[in-house]
Image: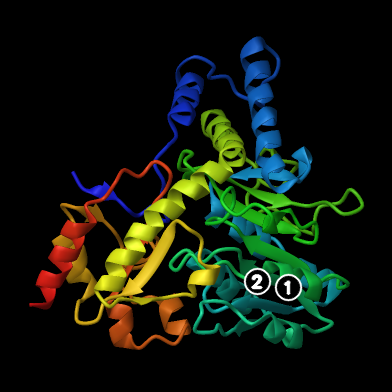
Amino acid sequence: MAIYLDCNATTPVEPSVAALVLRFLEKDFGNAASPIHDFGVFALAAVEHARGQVAEVVRARRDEVIFTSGATESNNLAILGLAEERLRSGRRHLITTAIEHKATLEPFEEMARLGFEVQILPVRRDGRFDPQRLADALRPDTLLVSTMQVNNETGVLQPLAEVADIVANRDTLWHVDAAQGYGKELEQLRHPRIDLISISGHKIYGPKGVGALIARKHDRQFPPLRPLMFGGGQEQGLRSGTLPVPLIAGLGEAAKLALRNNSDRIAKCRTFREKALSTFAALGAQQNGAEEYTLPHVLNVSLPGINSEQAIRALKRVIAVSSTSACTSHTRTSSHVLAAMGLSPEQVEQSLRLSWCHLTPEVDWHEVETILRALRG
């Protein structure tokens, strides 16, 4: 069976997470909104316990965690939830970057349709946006800046510390899509200046279908968000709907493990990375994204003379890899991220993304190299 190297698309589930989810599916299946009997009381306690576990990773408060179905919904709530703020404050300028996930770029397109002015910042060849361009773009009427923490295609860590300094004394809201970095790179997200953080359970060895928007309160008030769904008022009125207790408990367990085992996971990923880098260097591959900024579990390369679709098919019995974001791969569109970084269309078509984790077994790299060399003829 092939070794799975597509952890940026989704991760395997930690055994203790799976066991906990199953327990709340089969045994402790109460509704957290019905704490009128022991089943509901226990379900509510499990949700609040998980809320604290999720908050602890970024040093937020328990009441600042809003559970959602995942990072896509969290991004939509963080962006579209501000639509009415233009009417109150008159601020209509929004800033994001060219390498954001579609779950950010498409809500920005909708905000533009609603009358907001959207400014998209370019990125450098190293895969990062330029903080100075952001500083120059800010205006008195800038309502929101939205920047990802780690790019999903390249694994490149973005300059959030510099952004924190730039927006330090402004009332502009700052949203960070942390789907790929939450629980992996810890320090950046702990900066109190970040107002909104989107996270996803299935990127940190938890279940699919659950995530959170962490909305930091100032003077005991949330950022001026309006809900996107109505009908029950759960999650402090920002996200109605019956809470999926099994998934939330699993997310909490995954967050706990991510915090506790962070150093060990990083060390294992770095060891794996050395072998992957050596193999692709021998093939003359070009790394996409500066190595100094790339997290240890991701590698994006372009292989001269080898089309990525051919490579994926040829390698499928050895390793399972991808060539673009999982959320857009079904459309067969080329990578907007790599294009924004200045890669040629040919280089984009030759790109592969490998992403692994602490649970990934050893790969026969010699066989990988042999297969790829054979494709060149």
**Element at label 2:** loop
Q: Does residue 332 show up?
A: no
- Label 1: which residue? 162
299 or 239, which lies in front? 299
Q: Amino acid at mark 2?
A: Pro
Neighbours of disc 2 within 10 Å: few (<14), some (14-19), many (20+): some
Q: Is residue 111 above or below residue 341?
A: above
Q: Is residue 181 left or right of residue 137?
A: left
Q: Measure the alpha-carbon separation of dots 1 and 2.
A: 6 Å
- Label 2: which residue? 159
Residue 235 circle label? none
Q: Amino acid at mark 1?
A: Glu
Q: Residue at x 67, y 78 (%)?
A: 95
325 or 269, which lies in front? 269
Q: Are marks 1 and 2 in contact (CB under 8 Å)?
A: yes
Q: Residue at x 73, y 86 (%)?
A: 137
Q: Measuring from the top left, give residue 87's x and y in whole percent.
A: 80, 72
Q: Measuring from the top left, give residue 149's x and y in whole percent.
A: 60, 63
Quadrant of the image occupied by residue 6: bottom left
Q: Residue at x 43, y 44 (%)?
A: 358
User: From this viewpoint, which residue is outermost toward the top?
Assistant: 38
Q: Is residue 181 left or right of residue 219?
A: left
274 or 103, which lies in front? 274
